[in-house]
Amino acid sequence: MEHYLDNAATTKPCAEAAAAMMRCISEYYGNPSSLHSKGLEAQHEVDAARQTIADALGCKPQELLFTSGATESNNLALRGAAAAYGRKRKKMIVSAVEHASVKQTLAYLETEGFNVVPIAPGADGLYHPADFLAQVDKDTCLVSMMLVNNENGYRMPVEEVFRAVKRRDPEIITHCDAVQGFLKVPFRTRTLGADLVSISGHKVHGIKGVGALYVKQGIRVKPILFGGHQEKGIRPGTESVPLIAAFGAAAGALAPTLDARYEKVSQLRSRLLELLRSLDNVVIRDIPGASPYVLNLSLLGYRSEIVLHYLEKREIYVSSGSACSKGASSGVLETFGAKPEEVDSALRISLCAENTEEDLVALAEGLRDAQRELMH
């Protein structure tokens, strides 16, 4: 029996998303830019998905741009805002634990003359608005902070940080990578205080290859791709109607059940913690207020990759860190204070509402057997 516990890497597409994708592949296959009825059918699918996702985010549909995924959304947000607002202001402040698509984009912007200032967690392992405010000055054009850390589930204090930054200087652009938070933890774009928000389809039971960027009305983002008029000319290229429709269908299915799913996953997480605490030599990174969807642990003395493949043979699927780092350390756990031996043995367990207690028991038994059967 399969036990899939790697939902932060990707989720299984829901039935609604799969049906929407197939409908558009087989029936509504026209180009949305075409003026005939087949094009209008496809455009209707795009418009409907945009409205559904906007409703789930708490924004206007015209504030939503479709992209190929969160990596493109983050690139468009950061590079597009830099081009629009960075002619005179050259400072960008960012949390030091962002996803690679944010870190590497900012590294590129450094080569373009921007001064990127990473902010590490405090001595308590948490983030505080004062640490960001201490770096804000007249040269600051942008502040970026993810909503939920993809490796340990930490629910970052985005609202508090962005509110403090905007009070200091309303002209500073705020960006949030909300990929691990969208349709998992409650938030609305307005209360988040973000001018730009990145989201992804395949993290919420949609299909890989589609994402979106919320751009608050009145905020300028310059394109990083050039071509046609699609997505207001900011993200040109023929829209992938099947993937967009699937994203909309997934959002429509999940949004009404957000609170119920949060409660179920919270219960699963509590049960998982109970099972894990019965094991020896396990370090659990249980951060206060973390999203229940992600839990990071270390099986001390056993390398992550070896344990991961041991579990895989039992059809138990987990991760050794961010999927985008292909098992290599991203540096996030170290930044949060993990010791080298903990990083070497770290495993990320990521849940969804489809998981069961059987999945958790299988994992705990698998880890216990790994301790007994594997060499240190």
Image (tube, grey):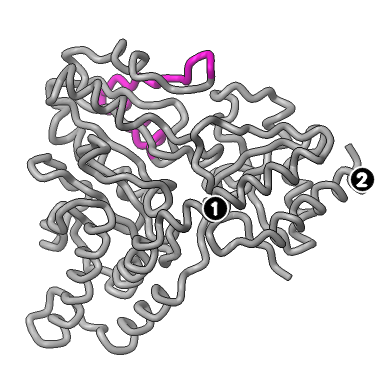
Please report the bounds of the magenta region as a residue range. Answer: 102-124
Q: Which residue is mark 2?
A: 372
Q: In the shown orientation, is residue 194 left or right of residue 368?
A: left
Coordinates of residue 66 in the picture (x, y in percent): 25, 59
Q: Residue 238 or 264: which is nearer the viewer?
A: 264
Identify the amino acid type marked 2.
Arg
> Callout 2 environment at 10 Å: few (<14), some (14 to 19), or many (20+)?
few
Coordinates of residue 271 in the picture (x, y in percent): 67, 48
Identify the amino acid type marked 1.
Val
Q: Which of disc 2 and disc 1 is earlier in sequence?
A: 1
> Callout 1 environment at 10 Å: few (<14), some (14 to 19), or many (20+)?
many
Q: Which residue is mark 1?
A: 265
Coordinates of residue 77 in the picture (x, y in percent): 25, 41
The residue at 22%/75% (across/down) is 45
- As displayed, is residue 74 above or below residue 16? above
Q: How many marks?
A: 2
